[in-house]
C-alpha cells in the first residue's frame, strides 16, 4: 500500500506536494513524540498520529528550536485534532519525516481509495430481437416521389349507337373535309425530349462457361491389327504346284529372270566409274590456288651460332607445336683446327621467332645425332663427335619453349641459368642455355663419332645379354648408339646397381657435385655411364668388321600391356632403378634384328642378341645378311611408318626399299641419279610418298603409286648447299611440315600441300599390293636368273652337238601370205554382195 | 503323272536357284499366299506381302500411263541384295540375289 501511494505521488509531483511538509525530527523530538525512527515507526508502518495540542505545546516550550516551528501556523490552523506524521524512510521528499498538512491528504493517505473491482457480468440470455418501431430518415419521401399515383380520377367515356340501328346495314356517305375541324398531328418540339438518363437493370454473368462438343470419327482406321498370315496347307500347295497354269507361268518367267541374274553377274550398272576415278583429295576444294609443291613456310637461322656450321641432325619437338631442334657441327675444315674451339650447341627454334633460338643445349663437343625421349620429351640424348653419349633434361625450360615470347619472359629461369654461363649472355637476349646432365664414361664410350642414336620403345627393354624383356615402367629408358668404330652399344639411363661399380668409381659418384643449375636427373650417370652391352659387327665372309653409320630396329608393339592407366604419368627418371634381369619376363616375339647401313654402302641385317660362343663368352652373332647396294656412305635407314617391314635406305647415288624377310635383295632399287642422295625420309601420312634430299640442294618427292622410275616432283635448289636432313611432321590435320636442313646451318620449314599429305583412297592397300608385287618380281627375277644360268650352260652344250636346222625360205612364206590375202578378198566381196553394198573397186579407183 | 508335272516346275526353279548369287526364291499365287519357297516361313511371308503390294502398284502405274502396256519385270536394288520380281498371269516369282562385286 505504501508503494502504491509513493508511486502515485511520484507520478503527480516531482517535489513534495503542497499538502505535506518534509521535516527533520531530532532524536529528542522523536522520543518525545514516540516516533523514533525504526522503532516506533518503521518502513512498514510509517504513520503516526500526533495530537495537535502536543505539537503546539512543543512549539511553545521549545520555540525556535522546535522542529515544528516552520509549520507552526499550519498546525494552528489545522481543523482536526490529529496530524499525521509519516516516516519517510526512503527520503522521498528529502527528509526523514513529513507532516501531512491537510485532513484530506490525511484521509487520503490513511484511507487510500479503493480500486474499483471489476463486476462480474451475468450470463445474458440470447433473446430474439423485438421489432422496433420504424424511424423515418427521409427515405419515405423519395419513395413517394418515385411512386406512381393517380393525380385524378379516371375518366370514362362510353359511345354506343342508337339501339334501333343495331343489326341494320350500314350506309356510308361522304362529307367535305373542310367542314370539320381537324386536329392534325404535328411534331411538337417541346416534346422532343432527349432521354439523358435511363435506368436499366444489370445482372452479373459468370465469366466461366463450360461447354462440350463431340468429335466425329470421320475416317475410321484401325491403329493396331493383329493377324496371322494365310497359309496353304501342304495338300493345297501340292495341288497348285501341279496346275498347268503354274507350269506355263514358270516357263514364261524363267528366261527373263535368268537374263536379269546374268546381267547382275556381268556388271554393276549402278557403279559410278567417273566418281570412283577421283581420289579423295579431289572432292572438295579446287580453289585454284592449291599449290602442288612444297611451300616455304619459314626459315630459321641464327647468325651468332650457325656461322660456319652445318646441321647434322634435326628433330621436331614431339609435343610442343612449332619447335625444332637442330644440332650444329663444325664443318670438316674447322674440325682440324683445334685452336678455334667454340662451344657446340643444339638450338631450339620456335615458329614465333625465326632468327633467335629459344633454347640452347650445351654439348661437350659437336653432336652428330640426337633424339627426344618418346616417353618424356624433356629428356634428350645425343651422340658426340668424340664418341660420348650425352643426356639433357630441359624440364626447367619447357615453359619458355611453350610460350610465344623468347627468353625475355622466362626471367626466372634465365637468372638461375646464366649464373654459370658466359658473360656475354647477360648482355643479350638471355637465351637460356642448358648444360648437359650426364655424359658417358670416356673410356667406355665409342672411339669414333656417334652417328646414330635411338631410344628403345617403351614397350620392351633389354638385359645385359640383349634378351628382350618386358618393361615395367612403360617408359623408354634405353638408348642404342652406333658408331663407325664397328660397335653398337646399348645404354640404360637408370640408376644401376652400385655394387657392380668398383670402389673408386663409387667414390667418384658420391663426391660428384652437380654444377649449379643443372638438373640432377641423371646425376648417377655422369661420367661413369657405361653401356649395358656391345654388339660388334664381324664381316660375314671376310675378317674385319663393318662400320655402321645408321641403323634401324623394329618398334615392338605389345597388346597385352594395357594396364588401364591412360594418363601418362612420366616417372621421375632419377628414381628409376635398373631391375635385375631375372625378375623380368622375357618377351619372345620381339624382333631383335637390326638393319644397319655402313660406311661402305652395305646394308647388314644382324641380330643383336649376344650368344655364347665356344669359349663360353658372350659374343655377338654374325650378321644374317649383307648387301652391297650403295657404293658409298649410307645415310638413311628408315622404316616406313605404315608398314613394319618396309625399310628405305639411301646412300651414294641411289636409294633402295627393302622388305624385312626378303633376304634376296631390295624389292625396289632406284636408278642411279646424277646427284648424291644425302637423305631420305618417309611421309608421315601417305604410305607411298617419300622425300629424297640431294647434294645440290634439291628435294625430290617420290610417289610409288604414280611413278616408280622418277620422282613426282623435284624442287631443285631449295638451298645452295647440300641437304643434310629432312624431317616431316604432322602438326595438325591441316598442317604438315617438312623441315629441311642444309650445310650452311639453315633450317627451312616447308608446308606440305594437301595433295601430298592426304592419302588417296585405299592407298595403304595399294602400296602393300605394290610391294608384294615387287617382292614377287624380285623372286621371279632371281629364279629366272638361275634358269638362264642353267639354260646358258645347257645351250652351250647343245650348240656343239646339234646339226643345223633347215631354215624355212623367205620366198615360200611370201607365197603363202599372198594366197591368204586373195582368199580374204574373195570373202569380202561375197559378204558385201550379200549385203548389197558391193562396189566394184575397179570403178572407183582413180587411174 | 502328277509327280512329273511337279518335277518340271522343280527343274525350272532349280535352274534359277543354281545361278550364281541367288539367295532364295518364292512363288506366290494371286492372293499373295506363298506356294513354294526356299526361305524360312517368316521371311517368306514378309516378302510375299510387301512385294505383292509393290508389284500391284507398279503394274497399275504402267497401265495407267498406257493401258495397253503391262509390267513384265520389277527389279529392286539395295545395298545388300537385288530383288527380282516377275509377274505373270496370276502368279509372282520373287528371286533374291547377292550382287557379285
Image (cartoon, coloured by chain):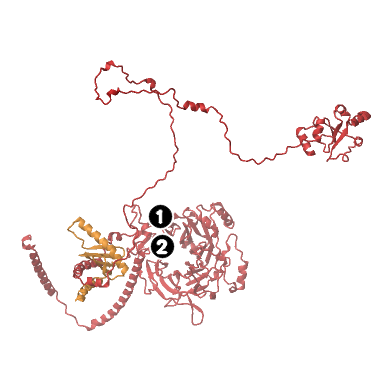
> Is A384 left, or right, of A85 in this rendering?
left
Crowding near pointer 1: few (<14 within 10 Å), some, many (20+)? Answer: some
The residue indicated by pointer 1 is: A296
Residue B81 visible in the picture: no
How many numbered discs sit on the rendered protein?
A: 2
Q: Residue at x 38, y 74 (%)?
A: A663
Colour of the chain lettered A: red
Foreground of the two, A771 or A24: A24
Chain letter for mark 1, please.
Answer: A
Earlier sequence position, callout 1 versus callout 2: 1
Which image quadrant is residue B27 in? bottom left
How far across and down, in percent of the image, does residue A485 sit? 48, 71
Q: Is residue A721 left or right of residue A127?
A: left
Q: Is residue A818 visible?
A: yes
Q: Quadrant of residue A526?
A: bottom right
* Mark number displayed over residue A684: 2
- Who's orange, chain-wise? B
Amino acid at each position: 500500500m505504501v508503494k502504491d501511494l509513493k508511486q502515485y505521488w511520484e507520478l503527480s509531483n516531482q517535489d513534495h506536494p503542497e499538502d505535506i511538509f518534509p521535516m527533520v525530527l531530532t532524536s529528542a523530538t522523536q522520543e518525545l513524540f514516540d516516533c523514533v525512527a525504526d522503532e516506533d515507526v518503521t518502513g512498514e508502518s510509517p504513520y503516526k498520529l500526533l495530537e495537535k495540542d502536543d505539537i503546539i505545546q512543543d512549539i511553545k516550550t521549545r520555540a525556535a528550536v522546535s522542529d515544528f516551528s516552520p509549520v507552526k501556523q499550519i498546525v494552528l490552523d489545522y481543523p482536526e485534532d490529529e496530524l499525521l506524521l509519516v516516516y519517510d524512510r526512503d527520503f522521498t521528499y528529502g527528509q526523514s519525516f513529513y507532516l501531512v498538512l491537510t485532513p484530506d491528504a490525511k484521509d487520503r493517505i490513511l484511507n487510500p481509495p479503493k480500486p474499483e473491482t471489476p463486476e462480474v457480468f451475468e450470463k445474458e440470455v440470447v433473446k430474439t430481437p423485438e421489432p422496433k418501431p420504424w424511424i423515418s430518415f427521409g427515405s419515405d419521401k423519395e419513395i413517394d416521389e418515385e411512386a406512381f399515383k393517380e393525380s385524378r380520377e379516371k375518366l370514362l367515356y362510353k359511345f354506343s349507337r342508337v339501339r334501333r340501328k343495331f343489326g341494320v346495314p350500314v350506309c356510308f356517305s361522304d362529307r367535305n373535309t373542310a367542314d370539320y375541324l381537324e386536329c392534325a398531328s404535328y411534331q411538337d418540339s417541346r416534346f422532343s425530349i432527349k432521354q439523358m438518363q435511363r435506368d436499366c437493370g444489370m445482372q452479373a454473368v459468370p465469366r466461366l462457361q463450360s461447354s462440350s462438343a463431340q468429335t466425329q470419327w470421320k475416317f475410321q482406321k484401325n491403329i493396331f491389327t493383329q493377324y496371322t498370315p494365310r497359309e496353304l496347307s501342304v495338300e493345297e500347295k501340292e495341288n497348285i504346284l501341279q496346275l498347268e497354269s503354274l507350269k506355263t507361268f514358270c516357263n514364261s518367267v524363267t528366261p527373263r529372270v535368268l537374263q536379269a541374274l546374268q546381267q547382275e553377274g556381268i556388271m554393276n550398272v549402278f557403279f559410278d566409274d567417273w566418281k570412283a576415278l577421283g581420289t579423295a583429295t579431289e572432292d572438295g576444294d579446287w580453289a585454284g590456288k592449291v599449290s602442288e609443291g612444297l611451300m616455304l613456310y619459314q626459315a630459321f637461322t641464327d647468325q651468332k651460332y650457325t656461322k660456319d656450321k652445318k646441321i647434322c641432325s634435326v628433330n621436331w619437338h614431339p609435343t610442343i607445336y612449332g619447335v625444332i631442334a637442330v644440332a650444329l657441327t663444325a664443318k670438316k675444315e674447322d674440325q682440324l683446327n683445334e685452336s678455334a674451339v667454340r662451344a657446340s650447341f643444339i638450338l631450339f627454334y620456335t615458329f614465333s621467332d625465326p632468327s633467335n633460338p629459344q633454347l640452347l643445349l650445351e654439348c661437350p663437343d659437336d653432336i652428330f645425332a640426337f633424339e627426344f625421349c618418346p616417353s618424356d620429351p624433356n629428356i634428350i640424348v645425343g651422340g658426340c663427335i668424340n664418341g660420348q653419349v650425352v643426356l639433357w633434361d630441359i624440364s626447367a625450360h619447357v615453359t619458355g619453349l611453350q610460350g610465344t615470347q623468347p627468353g625475355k619472359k622466362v626471367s626466372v629461369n634465365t637468372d638461375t641459368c646464366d649464373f654459370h654461363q658466359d658473360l656475354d649472355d647477360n648482355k643479350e637476349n638471355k637465351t637460356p642455355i642448358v648444360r648437359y646432365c650426364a655424359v658417358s664414361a670416356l673410356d667406355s664410350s665409342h672411339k669414333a663419332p656417334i652417328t646414330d642414336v635411338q631410344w628403345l620403345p617403351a614397350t620392351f627393354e633389354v638385359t645385359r645379354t640383349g634378351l628382350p624383356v618386358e618393361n615395367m615402367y612403360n617408359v623408354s629408358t634405353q638408348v642404342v648408339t652406333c658408331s663407325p668404330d664397328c660397335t653398337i652399344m646399348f645404354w640404360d639411363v637408370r640408376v644401376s646397381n652400385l655394387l657392380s661399380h668398383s670402389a673408386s668409381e663409387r667414390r667418384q659418384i658420391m663426391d660428384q657435385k652437380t654444377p649449379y643449375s643443372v638438373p640432377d636427373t641423371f646425376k648417377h650417370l655422369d661420367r661413369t655411364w657405361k653401356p649395358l652391352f656391345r654388339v660388334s659387327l664381324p664381316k660375314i665372309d671376310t675378317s674385319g668388321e663393318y662400320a655402321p653409320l645408321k641403323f634401324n630396329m623394329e618398334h615392338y608393339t605389345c597388346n597385352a600391356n594395357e594396364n588401364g592407366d591412360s594418363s601418362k604419368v612420366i616417372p621421375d627418371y632419377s628414381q628409376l632403378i635398373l631391375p635385375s634381369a631375372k625378375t623380368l619376363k622375357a618377351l619372345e616375339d620381339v624382333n631383335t634384328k637390326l638393319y644397319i647401313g655402313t660406311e661402305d654402302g652395305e646394308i647388314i641385317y644382324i641380330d643383336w642378341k649376344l650368344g655364347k660362343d665356344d669359349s663360353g663368352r658372350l659374343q655377338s652373332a654374325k650378321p644374317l645378311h649383307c648387301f652391297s647396294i650403295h657404293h658409298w656412305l649410307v645415310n638413311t635407314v628408315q622404316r616406313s611408318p605404315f608398314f613394319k617391314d618396309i625399310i628405305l635406305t639411301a646412300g651414294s647415288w641411289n636409294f633402295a626399299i627393302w622388305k624385312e624377310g626378303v633376304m634376296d635383295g631390295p624389292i625396289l632399287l632406284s636408278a642411279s641419279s646424277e646427284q648424291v642422295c644425302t637423305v631420305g625420309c618417309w611421309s608421315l601420312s601417305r604410305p607411298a610418298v617419300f622425300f629424297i634430299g640431294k647434294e645440290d640442294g634439291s628435294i625430290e618427292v617420290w610417289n610409288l603409286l604414280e611413278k616408280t622410275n622418277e620422282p613426282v616432283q623435284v624442287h631443285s635448289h631449295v638451298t645452295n648447299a647440300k641437304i643434310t636432313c629432312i624431317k616431316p611432321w604432322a602438326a595438325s590435320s591441316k598442317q604438315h611440315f617438312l623441315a629441311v636442313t642444309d650445310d650452311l646451318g639453315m633450317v627451312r620449314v616447308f608446308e606440305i600441300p594437301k595433295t601430298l599429305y592426304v592419302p588417296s583412297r585405299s592407298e595403304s592397300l595399294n602400296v602393300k599390293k605394290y610391294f608384294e608385287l615387287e617382292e614377287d618380281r624380285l623372286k621371279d627375277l632371281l629364279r629366272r636368273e638361275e634358269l638362264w644360268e642353267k639354260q646358258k650352260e645347257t645351250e652351250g652344250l647343245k650348240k656343239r652337238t646339234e646339226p643345223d636346222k633347215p631354215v624355212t625360205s623367205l620366198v615360200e612364206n611370201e607365197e603363202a601370205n599372198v594366197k591368204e590375202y586373195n582368199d580374204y578378198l574373195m570373202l569380202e566381196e561375197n559378204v558385201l554382195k550379200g549385203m548389197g553394198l558391193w562396189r566394184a573397186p575397179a570403178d572407183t579407183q582413180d587411174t | 503323272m502328277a509327280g512329273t508335272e511337279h518335277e518340271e516346275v522343280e527343274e525350272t526353279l532349280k535352274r534359277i536357284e543354281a545361278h550364281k548369287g541367288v539367295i532364295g526364291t518364292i512363288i506366290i499365287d494371286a492372293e499373295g499366299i506363298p506356294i513354294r519357297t526356299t526361305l524360312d516361313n517368316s521371311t517368306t511371308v514378309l516378302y510375299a506381302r510387301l512385294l505383292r503390294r509393290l508389284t500391284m502398284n507398279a503394274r497399275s502405274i504402267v497401265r495407267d500411263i498406257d493401258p495397253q502396256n503391262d509390267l513384265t519385270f520389277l527389279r529392286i536394288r539395295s545395298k545388300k541384295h537385288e530383288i527380282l520380281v516377275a509377274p505373270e498371269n496370276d502368279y509372282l516369282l520373287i528371286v533374291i540375289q547377292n550382287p557379285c562385286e
